[in-house]
Amino acid sequence: MQTAFGINIPMTLEDVCHPQKMALLVYDMQVGIAQQLPDGAAFIQQVKNVVDAARTHQMRVFFSRHTTLPKQVAGVSQLKSAMALQQVTNVAEVQPNFLPDSTSHAIVPELSPLSSEVAFDKLTMSAFVGSYLDLALRDARIEAVAIVGAVLEFGIEPTVRHAADLGYVPVLIQDACYSFSEQSRGRSLENLQSICLTTDVGTFNKTLNILHQA
């Protein structure tokens, strides 16, 4: 930790990895997304390891859910994004795959939020746009946000950038963030290296345990 001009400037994971000032964001770990991951079961377990550690230490846990609207009320950006992601060339071919209350929209059963946790819906890639996440974090005096989930190069990267712009310290738990290719992973990690702290599941959980014992 460095101190300058009357403020503390966190520099390491140890500086921010405290349940009282850090929250965990589980990004879009939904049934419809997990079904698209070739090694989905193993990856869900990796994310669960982080969630279990956060729960053990009573860290606030938030789950984001990507949501699609019926095509009749969807807007330009939603339809264009859906066309790109679904690799179709006509709006008529777009399928609203994540309608609220659909099976695909739900958080995977292995990670089902507890009654003390919340899942919130979003229409955009950044989990902070149009959601109550920022307000909830600020009201709880949270300073850092650890992030896990899927997919790094699609939604997690813009969420990390947005978190930094809002003044949080983003902590990217690399091996609990899914990527569809090593090339995409490498590009995203390089893009984010100057604005977030990075760690892995083992180090994150060990740091939580050590600080809790202290």
Image (cartoon, rainbow, N blue to C red):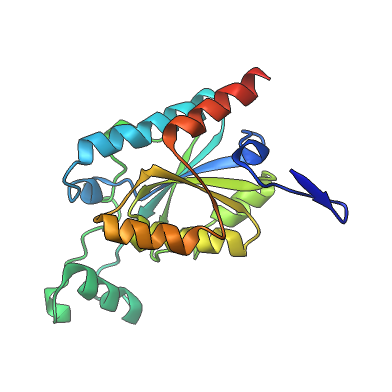
Relative vertical location of residue 124 with respect to residue 168 in this rendering, above or below: below
Say whether residue 35 is left or right of residue 113.
left
Q: Nearer the viewer, residue 47 or 72?
A: 47
Q: Quadrant of the N terminus?
A: top right
Q: Nearer the viewer, residue 168 or 95?
A: 168
Tell me where residue 141 sits by quadrant.
top right
Q: Give the quarter of the figure containing the C terminus.
A: top right
Residue at horizontal 26 percent and vertical 57 percent from the top: 98
Counting from the top left corner in percent of width and height, residue 67 is at: 33, 59
Q: Quadrant of residue 176?
A: top left
> Is residue 7 or residue 114 the one in the foreground?
7
Q: In terms of image quadrants, where is residue 119? A: top left
Picture coordinates of residue 175 (x, y %)?
37, 42
Q: Is residue 156 visible?
A: yes
The mark total stands at 0
Residue drawn at point x = 61 percent, y = 33 percent: 19
Seen in the picture, residue 89 relative to 118 is either above or below; the reply is below
Figure check: 110 above or below 84: above
Name the foreground residue: 206 vs 49.
206
- Residue 158 is situated, as x and y percent measured from the top left of the image, at 45, 64
- Which residue is at the far top? 213
| 16 sits to left or right of 5 | left
Q: Position of residue 32 (x, y in %)?
A: 22, 50
Q: Residue at x 17, y 80 (%)?
A: 91
